[in-house]
Image: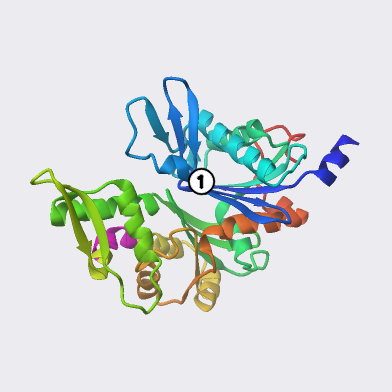
Amino acid sequence: MFDRWFKKTSHDIGIDLGTSNTLVFIQDRGVVINEASVVAVNTRAGQILAVGREALKMQGKTPAHLQVIQPLVDGVISDFEVAEKMLKYFFDRVHREHRMLTPRPRVVIGIPLDVTEVEKKAVEDAVMSAGAREVHLVQTIVAAAVGARLPIQDASGNMLVDCGGGVTQVAVISLSGVVASKSLRVAGSEVDVDIMNYARHEFNLLVGERVAEEAKLYISRSKEGAPLPTVKLRGRDLLTGLPREIGLSGEQMVSALRRSLKSIVDGIKSTLEVTPPELVADIYQRGITLVGGGASLLGLREAIVEATKMKVIVVDDPMTCAVRGMGLLLEDAALLREISIPSSQNDDIVR
């Protein structure tokens, strides 16, 4: 009786819990939260000061008793307590902003490829502790394929590259499952480090992570075919110790990102090498699909096209592709059962 009432009155939720950003999808409402996966903590009082963008503004600017923590590393939970509080904050915010006086929701949440049982259980426990009544785990890249409207249930090859904040995932999907895959520790965070290292080695300028990330986002928003803008970096001159500003041209930014782009391209090629030839033939015909926040990274699409000689498609709004796929899964119970990963919890929790 209560279970039927829960299903009628609760609003099911899809969560793309990423290293850099967390997105929340509510059934019938769409994407309602897109926040940084960052929490600011007062270590003296043990209090959460800010979550999301407000916490991100504090990064690199805090006194000793304040910490800005990213509870996820390479797409998996590294700080369970902080991750739980972050998810609880997002759940409470959803209920507050949308006036949802409803019971605990059913949640679909994405996890990376190649997670361990311990990492999988950490995600489930964090979501349950944050207020979910039921958790379904799906591989994020499979959810992204659903969000991109690819025919993953067919006996044909679909290749996706999901460029996230902490990890880049490459997968070939057929018959609702991953046939070949590779996880790369080269993603948005590593690109920021490339920009920082380039400024240091070429201009003797020490810049922070936030400055490097803003430069990456600025250049990635430039329209295809338009002249690349000059990106300004501000930091500390390593020779004088004084503040200094430099401008990086589009060509210099491409040079700064060359190492990361090569690593991603090599990962795609190595995945294709272990993919059955029948599926490779399908991929050659259909092309490679780019999803994730890093899909618009300067030079990435061109580098993949040059290396593979195949067409590369960047989906519309690539950052929300995975969480939109989770929203579609909430509406398709049969497909959700088909692609859900077996739970480490008891069978009566996840059905």
Q: Return the x and y of residue 270 as percentages of the image width and height.
A: 40, 61
In this view, the residue farthest toward the top is 44
* Quadrant location of the C terminus in the rendered image: top right
**Which residue does the image show at 51% across and 71% down from the upper left?**
280
Q: Return the x and y of residue 321 as percentages of the image width and height.
A: 57, 60
Magenta segment, prevailing SS (helix, strand or loop): helix
Q: Return the x and y of residue 172 as percentages of the image width and height.
A: 53, 62
**Which residue does the image show at 43% across and 26% down from the upper left?**
42
Q: Return the x and y of residue 215 as percentages of the image width and height.
A: 32, 58
Viewed as shown, does residue 281 lie left or right of 297? right
- Using the image, determine if residue 298 lies above or below residue 198: below
Q: Is residue 283 visible?
A: yes
Q: Mark 1: which secondary structure?
A: loop
Residue 105 lies in quadrant: top right
In the picture of the structure, the residue carrying the numbered disc 1 is 114
**Magenta residues, as a range?**
255-263
Q: Is residue 187 visible?
A: no
Q: Is residue 256 magenta?
A: yes
Q: Is residue 78 magenta?
A: no
* Quadrant location of the N terminus in the rendered image: top right
In this view, the residue farthest toward the left is 239
In this view, the residue in front, 199 or 98, is 98
- Using the image, determine if residue 114 lies above or below residue 280: above
